[in-house]
Image (cartoon, rainbow, N blue to C red):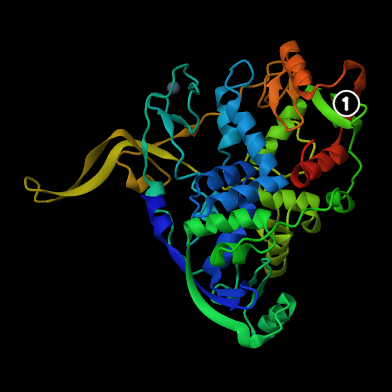
Amino acid sequence: MASQQQNSKTIPLKVLVDKNSNKVVFVEATKDFVETIFSFLSLPLATIVRLLATATNNNSDQQHQQSESSPFLGNIKNLYQSVQNINSNDIWSSPACKQMLLRPRNPCESLLKELFLNIDDTESSIEYFVCSTCYKFTTFENLNCTCGNPPNKKPRNLDSESQGNNNQNGVFLRESGAMFLVSDKLKIFPSSKVNSLMMLVESGCSDFTQLEEVTHNIGKQEILNLLKYTLTSHEPLTNTILVSSSKIIDDPPNQYESAVRVMPSPSDSSKMNIKVVQSKSQNKIITIEDNGDFVDFIFSFLTMPLGSIVKLLGANSFAGSGCVGNLYKSVENLDPTSVLLNPGIVPQFGCPNQPLNIPHVQPPPTTYYYGTGTPKLEWDHYYDGYRTIEVTVEGGVISKSKGSIYNAKTLIALDPRPLNSSEEGVVGFLKRTTFYGVGGNLEVKPLSANFCLSYLKELSLPIDDLEVKVIPIGETEALMFLGAFLTSKLP
Ligand SMILES: [Zn+2]
């Protein structure tokens, strides 16, 4: 299996350790390592939550504390769980919507397959459902084919088994043969004597006799830890390689505001209105009432890749320790045209009324083929020659390569989202009939009088302390909201 192959792969690192402070000064590595950590920027937020949840950790207590004290990870986990907990079909506009939010596709998925070590397993773990009458397919469960029947086949994906080729050309890096230096704070430079000296000086190391070079082979689990620490710590390499604990630097409040590029909203018509219930005495938002547009917008954070979010908010303002910003700037310095600087959202995975300026990527069109089995050359005694026979596979097989399937049929993709009957285009993730309450910790629930009452009881706030306001949300407000979501503890 591809994932097992990825799990056992390691990348050698030369680690320069300051024994005095027990910290990593920098590591020297090939493109394989640098490209894998660059790929963090391609990950949609839901993928980050999912990958970190599966990461086994040796020092679970410490890691647990760290993710809890990081507003960024805490908030996206809450959002993910909120989506996970909504089961009612009265809320989702199609059964596929929940899956889209929890398992968004990576906008760079075809590039990631070329990486030596790819941590995003979304595509290889995707299941395909095929209607063998119409030759239509979908990756979403419970979605009916256009003929009205549910897809009847669950073919084996032949492509996921050949994942992870050792490509000599760089995927995200042009200087593929070179070595790179990666600082503890994830600043990355081509390896040179001058750059290593610069990093030594920057690290504050005063006693060069205390430096020690060690080799370390880093594997997928540790890379996942590195992803976690990149989002939560100011010394992710030290945390990952030396497994030392470090305190998280708390973000100064409202840090994002100064760097958020405030742009005028193109038109007032693109604004959505939300009704907010506020506590006058505590000056904080208790709950938000919305027709679905705003909740769609918040939910769509899960499908946004990290790189596009850093692009929107600015590398200096990004949540946490600044390491994500450093990573972003390193990509920019090494390749200003890199796709990772704004990977965008895979078509169909965004929210239709997106107030933010995130592009929808157009990946190269992929054709999938389906068949009932794979071809095999067999000696035929009767004809005295080879002929191709079919090795049937239960459920059939699916692949992007026509040649790997016996009697391959071209498949057409089903659109997971229902069309909007009254207007042009598709509806969002949620139905437009209900109102939704967004709690202070971004819990989204269908709004009912019952929910409101129990919530108010929980907060034990007097009724006369509450006031209701209508707030229009345009691009500026949406950016501020996203910034606040990533950097502060809510509410
Ligand atoms: Zn069909």
**12 or 222, which is in the foreground?**
222
Disc 1 residue type (three-letter): Gln
Confirm whether residue 44 shows in the render: yes
Q: In this image, 313 relative to 306: left or right?
A: right
Q: Residues within 10 Å of mark 1 (few under 14, many from 20)?
A: some
Q: Position of residue 388 (x, y in %)?
A: 21, 46
Q: Provide the secondary structure element on which disc 1 rests.
A: strand
Report ligand 1 position as a quadrant: top left
Q: Camera-side residue: 440 or 152?
A: 440
Q: Is residue 35 above or below residue 275?
A: below
Q: Splitting the image into 4 quarters, where does residue 276 fall?
A: top right
Residue at screen point 69% across, 84% down: 197
Quick check: 321 left or right of 104?
Answer: right
Q: Please indicate, yes or no, whether residue 166 appears anywhere in the rendered image.
A: no
Q: Could you tell me which residue is drawn at 40 percent across and 59 percent down? A: 8
Q: Quadrant of residue 490?
A: top right
Residue at which label 1 appears: 278
Q: Assign the C terminus to one quadrant of the image.
A: top right
Identify the image quadrant of residue 225: bottom right
Q: Position of residue 385 (x, y in %)?
A: 13, 52
Instruction: Work out whether 17 lies above or below 41.
Output: below
The structure residue drawn at horizontal position 61% and vertical position 49%, both measured from the top left corner, is 43
Residue 205 image offset from top left, x and y in percent: 70, 80
Choose between 127 and 71: the one closer to the eye. 71
In the visual, does 275 lie left or right of 249?
right
